[in-house]
């Protein structure tokens, strides 16, 4: 399975995790996801995800004027976003543990 | 492509998306940020604006990503077809033909109107027909020449389709129209030579001739010719009879013909009261009349009476 397919399912959680660490603007979030190892993440996917999470009421946003470049719209988690993050993180951890156990079993049967 | 142009292209690609304005609220700033980071063009880094818009909506929701991908494929295919040289040359050729189509369309519409007012016809038959025809052609050309303000494009397409259908049915009508007869076209006639204009016939209702002398005695072996000296031949095949070939190749203008029903039942006239006695089934060839031996036909034959070798008698 391509990692881009896997990424689709967990992009929300990845974006929430990045913003849980600290607030960020759109391209900053993309860069941080890539730096964290999700190199295939698409700019438009992140942008669309940010807008959706914002519309869903999980994020707050504020504009920071910049002297040298364009205005930057920063996003951060609000209470709803933080609850969403912890719930999804729990789900992911359970899922990841299940998958890890499954793969471990498959590997043992192979040998 | 500048960030502004790219953002505009994405906006156009998302035309119709219910949340477009909200979704693209800060796209310009976002793209400007990306553009400021590197000199590599945006299209290289982000793909085409259309692909960007598709990825955006897939992540945002509102439109199912899969179906929009399918539409993208359709759009791509369409672009490939419309960009093809053959398509372009065909299109420009058809454009050149358009004035001709306008005239034809006007003619067809006028003929449909005329035919619905009175009897079905394919050509104008009176001054009123001509007037309607001129109006139809002029109106159609006028409509076709209008380049702006085509309010009723849908109606125009409908009219074009109707005119094309009427034209096709007109073609079928012409194909079935046989000027020689009011009867429905009989496929066997195509191979009968009747439609070829020769030899002369007595019309489709006569397939045999029973001659009588002045004293009421039936005549046999009467050779008939027309004013041009050509043998007068009927088409009994159209009525389910064939000339009896029991005595060899029959002479087709020697009446009465010895006819054999295709049901193998020799007879002369169906249900006729005055059925003449059966002529000698096999008249000898020596009985071929000469101008002196028997009442001469109106124009005496200029050629031998025997069946011509060209195969007219082989039918």
Image (cartoon, coloured by chain):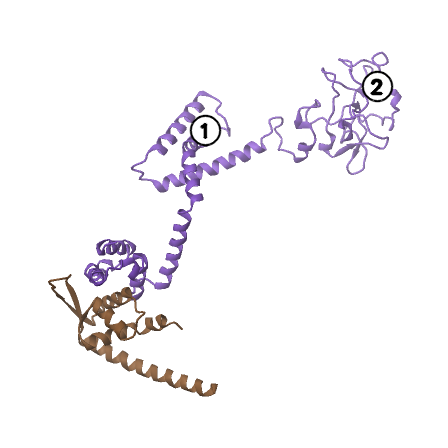
Chain colours: A brown, B purple
Q: In which quarter of the image is the N terminus of chain B?
A: bottom left
Which quarter of the figure has residue B109? Answer: top left
Q: Name the residue under label 2.
A: B217
Where is residue B23 drawn, in percent x and y?
A: 23, 61
- Relative to A64, residue B269 above or below: above
Q: Say which of B295 and B11 sits in front.
A: B11
Q: Say which of B12 and B108 sits in front.
A: B12
Q: Which residue is drawn at 28% across and 64% down?
A: A44
Nearer to us of marks 2 and 1 is: 1
Q: Name the residue under label 1.
A: B114
Which quarter of the figure has residue B293? Answer: top right
- Relative to B166, residue B84 above or below: below
Q: Say which of B33 and B117 sits in front.
A: B33
- Report helix, strand or loop for mark 1: helix
- Relative to A31, residue B25 above or below: above
Q: Say which of B173 and B102 sits in front.
A: B102
On the picture, is B220 further left or further right than B166? right
Where is residue B242 drawn, in percent x and y?
A: 77, 33
**Structural crowding at the residue carrying mark 2, measured as other residues with C-alpha within 10 Å and reported as few (<14), some (14–19) or many (≥20):** few
């Amino acid at each position: 399975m391509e990692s881009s397919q896997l990424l689709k399912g967990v992009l929300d959680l990845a974006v929430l995790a990045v913003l849980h660490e600290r607030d960020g603007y759109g391209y900053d979030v993309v860069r941080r996801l890539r730096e964290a190892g999700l190199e295939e993440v698409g700019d438009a996917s992140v942008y669309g995800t940010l807008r959706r999470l914002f519309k869903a009421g999980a994020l707050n946003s504020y504009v920071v004027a910049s002297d040298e470049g364009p205005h930057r719209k920063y996003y951060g988690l609000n209470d709803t976003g933080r609850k969403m993050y912890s719930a999804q993180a729990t789900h992911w951890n359970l899922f990841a543990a299940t998958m890890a156990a499954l793969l471990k079993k498959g590997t043992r049967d192979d040998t | 492509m500048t960030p502004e142009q790219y953002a505009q292209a994405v906006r156009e690609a998302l035309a119709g998306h219910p949340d477009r304005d909200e979704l693209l609220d800060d796209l310009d700033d976002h793209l400007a940020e990306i553009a400021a980071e590197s000199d590599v063009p945006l299209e290289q880094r982000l793909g085409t604006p259309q692909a960007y818009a598709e990825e955006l909506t897939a992540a945002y929701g509102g439109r199912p990503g899969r179906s929009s991908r399918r539409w993208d494929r359709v759009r791509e295919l369409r672009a490939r077809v419309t960009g093809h040289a053959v398509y372009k040359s065909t299109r420009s050729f058809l454009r050149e033909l358009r004035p001709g189509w306008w005239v034809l369309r006007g003619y067809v519409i006028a003929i449909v109107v005329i035919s619905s007012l009175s009897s079905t016809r394919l050509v104008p038959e009176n001054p009123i027909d001509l007037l309607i025809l001129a109006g139809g052609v002029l109106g159609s050309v006028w409509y076709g020449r209008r380049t702006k303000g085509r309010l009723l494009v849908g109606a125009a397409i409908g009219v074009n389709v109707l005119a094309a259908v009427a034209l096709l049915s007109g073609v079928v009508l012409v194909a079935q129209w046989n000027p020689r007869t009011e009867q429905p076209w009989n496929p066997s006639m195509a191979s009968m030579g009747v439609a070829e204009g020769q030899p002369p016939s007595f019309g489709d209702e006569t397939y045999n001739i029973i001659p009588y002398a002045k004293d009421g005695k039936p005549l046999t072996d009467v050779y008939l010719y027309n004013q041009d000296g050509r043998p007068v031949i009927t088409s009994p095949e159209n009525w389910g009879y064939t000339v009896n070939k029991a005595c060899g190749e029959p002479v087709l203008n020697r009446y009465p013909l010895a006819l054999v029903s295709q049901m193998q039942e020799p007879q002369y006239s169906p249900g006729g009261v005055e059925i003449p006695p059966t002529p000698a089934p096999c008249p000898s060839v020596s009985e071929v009349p000469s101008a002196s031996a028997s009442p001469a036909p109106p124009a005496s034959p200029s050629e031998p009476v025997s069946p011509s070798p060209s195969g007219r008698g082989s039918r």
